[in-house]
Image (spheres, helix red, strand yellow):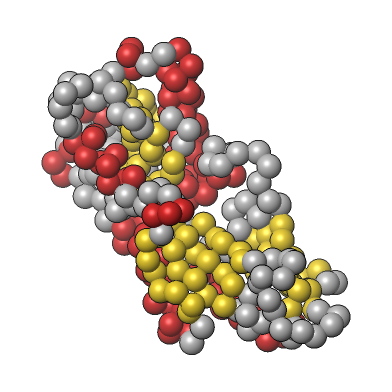
Amino acid sequence: MGMTTAIHRRVDALRTGVEPTFVARLASGWAVMGDPQILPGYCLLLPDPVVGNLNVLDRATRSQFLSDVAALGDAVLAATGALRINYAIFGNVEPALHAHVIPRYEFEPAGQRELQPWALDWSAAPSFDIADHGALREKIHATLGRASQIGARGRVHHLDLTVGDLVVAAAFYDAVLPLMGFKRQPDVPEGPIWSGDSMEIGLQAARHSRPHDRYAPGLHHLAFEAPGRQDVDRVYEQLVALGVRVLDAPAEYPSYGAGYYAVFLADPDGIKLEYAFTP
């Protein structure tokens, strides 16, 4: 295009993991929360790489972008309970492709529900704030995950860890896993289980006692996905407060990919765990 737009700058920030409105990386680009939040759950899809408009894309890439827009709309609709979704692609102010996904609600004032979104008072809309809008952002992210829009087929269903002391390990994971988005489920005969958006973690008691060696055959380490860099920092602070053994404080690992950011810790048996953000 020969120019830099706000869309270019935002995509650059998303690639480095410093964009707070990040929702998810989809096949064609980045789902983000709109700023301002003209209506709760307003999102955009930004293509990566950035292009001038929809018509410059080849047929397959264009179809993927439009499919991702609809999938983001499905997720926003499910996460917000909105009446419907308004979709828009303009590019007049910012001449780079981006799609608006705007939920509409029953609670909107009489006379507003029939208006197109750009007839609303955008100057009065609240700016995106993680404290106010972070929970809805995570709900949309989780909905995209359950719909298999994030990641691909072949994902892990569950993983069981063998631990030396089931009571001690259960207490540890009961404190740590909820920090990473897991919820305790009813125990099974083998031991406790926690579920995330796309996989389960279970514990079983070891039949033989020996120190864990991640360089012996078996599990080297287990990594959990973080929705953003700030979540890695948040979990690190909580781990320190809990007295968990942190192996490596949050840091960037460019050898693993651009923007890769992670913290490493150990469970009571010395099993290495990781909480990582990958843009």
Q: Position of residue 81 (x, y in %)?
A: 47, 42
Q: Position of residue 222 (x, y in %)?
A: 61, 64
Q: Where 77 falls versus 194 (above or below)?
A: above
Q: Residue at x 48, y 16 (%)?
A: 60
Quadrant housing the N terminus: top left
Q: Position of residue 238 (x, y in %)?
A: 43, 77
Q: Where 229 falls versus 19 (above or below)?
A: below
Q: Residue at x 74, y 78 (%)?
A: 163
Q: Where 243 falls versus 100 (above or below)?
A: below
Viewer-side residue, 128 vs 19: 19
Tally the marks: 0
Q: Indicate left or right for 276 with 156 as reference.
A: left
Q: Residue at x 54, y 37 (%)?
A: 149
Q: Residue at x 49, y 71 (%)?
A: 264
Q: Is residue 40 visible?
A: no
| Residue 66 found in image quarter | top left
Q: Is residue 274 visible?
A: yes
Q: Position of residue 93 (x, y in %)?
A: 15, 26
Viewer-side residue, 111 vs 212: 212
